[in-house]
């Protein structure tokens, strides 16, 4: 079973993405394990629960193993209580751009002021249209991984 996630990650320059968004969902997530080689995440996204395991990224940070299963929200809520300190709270906006969907995460709490956009690709060199509100690319910069933001909040940078 090979589950590869290929994505690029960017800072966001302004909030024009909000007017282009096709959906908006609140997300709360915590980490049962934040080891760089394998993170185990519990997430509640709107009214659904998820358990996700991610592996270590490749040298460029664009590709890594990802396994995710939907779980009942009550189980996700129970697992969140077992998570390491530092729950992540954010609102995710989805924006269609050409053949891709950009997921724009507007963080709150200790990561207030940080907005990151991600786009999933089929290959590392796949072409995609960049929205005008996209800023500096931060793919592979571990500071912007949610697992790291849960331990070293944006407000503390």
Image (cartoon, helix red, strand yellow):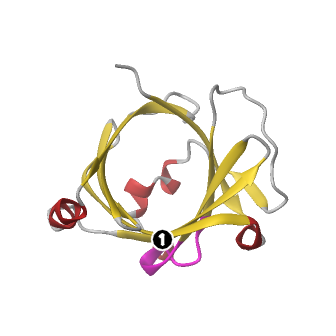
Which quadrant would residue 105 be assigned to in this image? bottom right
Q: Position of residue 63 (x, y in %)?
A: 52, 31
Instruction: Please name the residue shown 66% across and 49% down the image.
Output: 101
79 vs 100, nearest the viewer: 100
139 to 84, vertically: above or below: above
Instruction: Please name the residue shown 81% across and 48% down the image.
Output: 130
| Other-residue count near label 1 (Cα within 10 Å), few / some / many at <14 / 14–19 / ≥20 | many
Q: Quadrant of the N terminus?
A: top left
In magenta stretch: residue 114: yes
18 vs 146, nearest the viewer: 18
Q: Position of residue 107 (x, y in %)?
A: 52, 72
In magenta stretch: residue 37: no
Q: Is residue 5 visible?
A: yes
Which quadrant would residue 3 be assigned to in this image? top left
Q: Position of residue 65 (x, y in %)?
A: 41, 30
Instruction: Please name the residue shown 43% across and 80% down the image.
Output: 109
Residue numbers of the magenta segment: 107-115
Per the image, label 1 sits on a secondary structure element best described as strand
Q: Position of residue 66 (x, y in %)?
A: 39, 35
């Amino acid at each position: 079973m090979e589950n590869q996630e290929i994505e690029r990650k960017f800072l966001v320059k302004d909030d024009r993405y909000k007017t282009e968004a096709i959906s908006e969902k609140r997300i709360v997530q915590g980490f049962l394990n934040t080891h760089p080689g394998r993170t185990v995440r519990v997430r509640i996204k709107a009214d659904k629960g998820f358990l996700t395991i991610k592996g270590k990224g490749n040298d460029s940070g664009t590709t890594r193993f990802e396994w995710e299963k939907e779980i009942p929200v009550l189980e996700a809520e129970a697992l969140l209580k077992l998570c390491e300190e530092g729950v992540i709270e954010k609102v995710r906006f989805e924006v269609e751009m050409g053949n891709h969907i950009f997921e724009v995460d507007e963080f709150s709490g200790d990561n207030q002021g940080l907005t990151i956009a991600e786009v999933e690709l089929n290959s590392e060199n796949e072409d995609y249209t960049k929205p005008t509100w996209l800023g500096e690319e931060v793919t592979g910069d571990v500071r912007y991984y949610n697992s790291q933001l849960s331990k070293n909040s944006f407000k503390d940078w």
